[in-house]
Amino acid sequence: MPVVSVYDKEGEQAGEIELNEELFGAEINEDVLFEVSQALLAAQRRGTANTKTRAEVRGGGRKPWRQKGTGRARHGTIRSPIWTGGGVVFGPKPRSYRQSIPKKKRRAAMRSALSSKVNNGELIVLNEISLSQPKTKEISRILDNLNAKGKVLLVTADQDRNVYLSGRNLERIKTTLAGKLNVLDILDCDQLIMTKDAVSTVEEVFAS
């Protein structure tokens, strides 16, 4: 069973915590991680690209010239796809890019993502984090105390508006709730910081 240190806001060790073996000590399945992360990226696509066919473009109501006798090729409309300003053949239309991923596969990817952070020493468990008022300087100080480098994902159990407002001005930090944690956010961060309550919530939600 993985055991990691618990730190306070000053960066001092405040104890240890035993993590769920199934969730934080699982074998890493890179294929499942890739498939689920690609599905999450695809779901973020808006799918609003739209082109008009020859039936939808404006104009072209009459035949540009008579069928025979002009020496030119016959045409029925100036909005044919071979004309400038004409319709588009096989162009994109609004669609959904969402992919269906089985629940078991999503949970397997979550186990692999969390376990990879533990294996790489990129998981920091925080005793608690609470701010009396929104203050970016304070959240930045906490990250420095924890020696958190690069992109940081801060996971809390419950919504804390002060923490959210304090962190949103820092480009390198993203805050989220334990119940909304996803594989893509975990893989995208260099340092995963979770409160003890958030760890308990994640184990409750994602451990089978």
Image (spheres, rainbow, N blue to C red):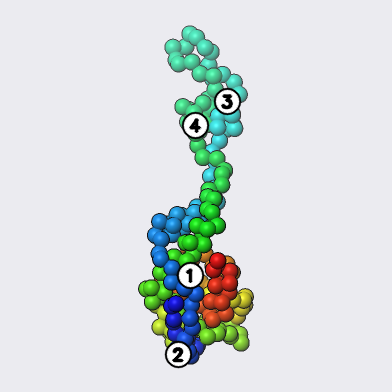
- Label 1 sits on a secondary structure element that is helix
**What element does badge 4 sit on?**
loop
Across and down, in percent, residue 153 comes to 48, 73
Q: Residue at x 58, y 85 (%)?
A: 130
Instruction: Identify the residue at image location x=50%, y=88%.
Output: 8
CA separation in Å, label 3 and label 2? 75 Å
| Closer mark to the observer between disc 3 and disc 4 | 4
Which residue sits at x=61%, y=85%? 133
Q: Check disc 1 and give the amino acid type.
A: Glu
Q: Residues within 10 Å of mark 4 (few under 14, many from 20)?
A: few
Q: CA distance from mark 2 to mark 4?
A: 64 Å
- The first of marks 2 and 1 along the sequence is 2
Dot 3: element: loop
Which residue type does callout 2 highlight?
Answer: Gln
Q: Which mark is residue 89?
A: 4
According to the image, label 2 marks what residue?
Answer: 13
Query: CB under 8 Å between callouts 2 and 4?
Result: no
Marks 2 and 1, how far apart in space? 25 Å
Label 3 crowd (10 A; few <14 / some 14-19 / many >=20)? some
Mark 3 — residue? 60
Q: Nearer the viewer, mark 3 or mark 2?
A: 2
Q: Quadrant of the N terminus?
A: bottom left
Amino acid type, mark 4: Val
The CA distance from mark 3 to mark 4 is 16 Å
Percent from the top left, x then y, of residue 115? 43, 70
For the point 50% across and 37% down, the residue is 91
Q: Reading the chain from its start, which is encountered first: label 3 or label 1?
A: 1
Q: Quadrant of the C terminus?
A: bottom right
